[in-house]
Image (cartoon, rainbow, N blue to C red):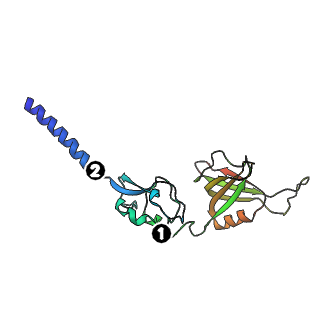
Amino acid sequence: MLFGALTVLVGAVAGVQVAARVDDRLAVLAVARPVKAGQVIAAADVTTALVSVDAGVATMPASSRSSVIGRIAAMPLAKGMLLGPAQVGPPQWPAAGEALAAVAVKPGRAPDGLAPGMRVTVLIVPQIQPGTAVDTGGAATVRAEATVESVHQTADQNGGLLVTVLTNTEAAQRIAAASGEAALVQHGADG
């Protein structure tokens, strides 16, 4: 009986050791800190991660780290994302038909916690002449759907924001050409 218990115990220990050694995870490259599109990838920008990935997910093996350092980020790279071959090389961002636009937003005209990645509607309302209900240029309100790319406090003391948004090229041109008060409206989870 003692021999049987000892055999079971040895078998269990051996099983645990074998299971620990049989690891189907792969060492792949991941982003250690945010990198902007067009920026040279530095050693501190890249780390390794042990992951189990589906065959359809494009990754780069950890052994290719030296070939990534010094290359250009083809698109914005977020901290924690896995690196794939399409994300390294000549800039491919913004994609064809897309453009970036800068929007100056006064305090109270943007949602609290505005951050990159949020979907928003950009509204630019033409300025109204004081004492009248007529706008100064006969322009219509500009409305465009966009994704927030960056948010920065303005240098003035008013607490405004300078928000860079990604949208389609035509909407970006309308935003850039518009004059008036800008506001951002955050989309809900469904759109």
Residue at figure coordinates x 78%, y 58% from the top left = 180
Q: Which residue is mark 2?
A: 23
Q: Nearer the viewer, residue 29 or 25?
A: 29
The spot of residue 93 in percent (x, y) is 55, 66
Residue extending furthest toward the top: 1
In the rendered view, does 112 fall on the left or right side of 77? Answer: right
Say what amino acid the circle numbered 1 marks: Gly
Residue extending furthest toward the right: 131
The spot of residue 29 in percent (x, y) is 40, 58
The spot of residue 85 in percent (x, y) is 42, 65
Residue at figure coordinates x 88%, y 56% from the top left = 129
How many labels sit on residues? 2
Say what amino acid the circle numbered 2 marks: Asp
Label 1 vs label 2: CA separation? 32 Å
Residue at figure coordinates x 89%, y 53% from the top left = 130
In this rendering, which labeled residue sits more in front, label 1 or label 2? 1
Query: Which quadrant of the structure image shows residue 123?
Result: bottom right
In the rendered view, does 145 fall on the left or right side of 140? Answer: left
Residue 1 visible, this angle: no
Residue 107 marker: none
Asked if the residues shown at circle 1 and circle 2 are in contact, with their CB atoms under 8 angstroms apart, the answer is: no
Residue 175 visible, this angle: yes
What is the secondary structure assignment of the residue under circle 1? loop
What is the secondary structure assignment of the residue under circle 2? loop
Mark 2 neighbour density, 10 Å: few (under 14) some (14–19) many (20 or more): few
Q: Which residue is mark 1?
A: 89
Q: Quadrant of the N terminus?
A: top left
The spot of residue 86 in percent (x, y) is 45, 66
